[in-house]
Image (cartoon, rainbow, N blue to C red):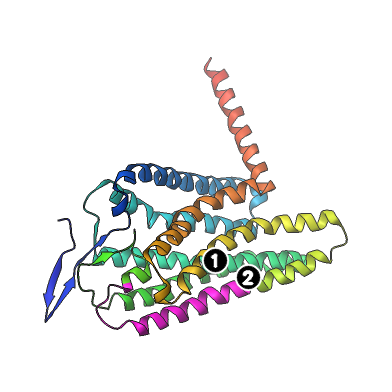
Amino acid sequence: MSGSESTMIGNQTLCTHFTFVAFSSLAELQLVLFGVFLVIYLFTLGGNSIIIYLISVTPSLHTPMYFFLVNLSFLEMCYITSVVPQMLVHLLVQNKTISVAGCAAQMYTFTILGLTECCLLAAMAYDRFVAICYPLHYSLLMGPGVCLKLAAASWLTGVVVESAQTTWIFSLPFCGAGRIQHFFCDIMPVVKLACVDTSHNELVLFCVSVLFIMSHCLLILCSYVRILGAIVGMPSAAGRRKAFSTCSSHILVVSLFYGTALFTYLQPKTAHTPRTDKATALMYTVVTPALNPVIYTLRNKEVKEAFQRVTQKNALRQMAQTSRGS
């Protein structure tokens, strides 16, 4: 079946399947896009896996900052996996459909991971704030128990808030052809298909975005205002450079993530167009997760040194095995 299936309930035709039409006008480029997105996806999985491995085998990296980085890397792997594999399949097949239940499952996963990342980035900013502004109390204020609670609170917030919101969205009736002007089940393209007034849903979505996205963004901004003040007040240039270097990677990641999130979810419905929705969605679902491992390796001296040590250790082990075998 090439289109979306439907069923009659009362006088309305309700969708049971949706059809993605984001790349329908790019039929001649779909194989090229498949190759590009597949390479990016594999690079993202590989890069984040390497970061997790390096931190797990390097005792000097068993600190709160890298504990949160492991969580972020795992989160990014799940985040991109919630969208890209299905998109890759749809680039190869004519039937680009998804059931309403499958669409709901994708939205649950994607939104939970997205809000969790908002909370986790705020926790990472708090970690840097304590490390730079209260260095003598850092081990006390950011002990293992505190880190676990912050990480758990991030995941719990994402699960509770987005599960409620997505459940509400999929309590709406969806009518008509069920054609989604997108490449995955993002919130606004799906809400547009509802055959009832969705103004209340849009208001709730806006309030959730302001409360949970903007509040965490403000926490991060406040943390970095204090951090900047502490760095400027440091007596030595070397100390200022070192303090800033520990924050620069996080600042870049926050800028990429929040820039696209704020642009997407704080716009009114009338400002959304299929072209802008697809462009910004590609940024936060594909590009940003791929850039994170690059940012945290190329701009992080400790991670690069850990990579060199592990690489040299593996090379020496391989040479020893080769010499024994000969």
Label 1 crowd bin: few (<14), some (14–19), many (20+), radius 10 Å: some
Residue, far right: 235
Secondary element at tag 2:
helix
Q: Which residues are magenta?
A: 191-220
Q: Nearer the viewer, residue 22 or 223?
A: 22
Q: Is residue 289 above or below residue 33?
A: below
Q: Quadrant of residue 222?
A: bottom right
Tell me residue 57's x, y (percent): 59, 45
Question: What residue do we see at 59% from left, 29% from top?
Answer: 315
- The type of residue carrying mark 2 is Ile
Q: Earlier in the sequence, mark 2 or mark 1?
A: 2
Tell me residue 38's x, y (percent): 39, 44
Indicate yes or no whether the magenta region holds residue 197.
yes
Q: CA distance from mark 2 to mark 1?
A: 11 Å
Please name the residue that numbered disc 1 is placed on.
258
Question: What residue do we see at 30% from left, 44% from top?
Answer: 28
| Residue 255 falls left or right of residue 22 | right
- The type of residue carrying mark 1 is Tyr
| Residue 255 falls left or right of residue 139 | left
Indicate yes or no whether the magenta region holds residue 140.
no
Q: Which mark is residue 243?
A: none
Mark 2 or 1: the one toward you: 1
Q: Which mark is residue 220?
A: 2
Q: Is residue 209 above or below residue 256?
A: below
Whether the residues at callouts 2 and 1 have beta carbons within 8 Å, the answer is yes
Tell me the chief SS of the magenta region.
Answer: helix
Question: What residue do we see at 72% from left, 64% from top?
Answer: 131
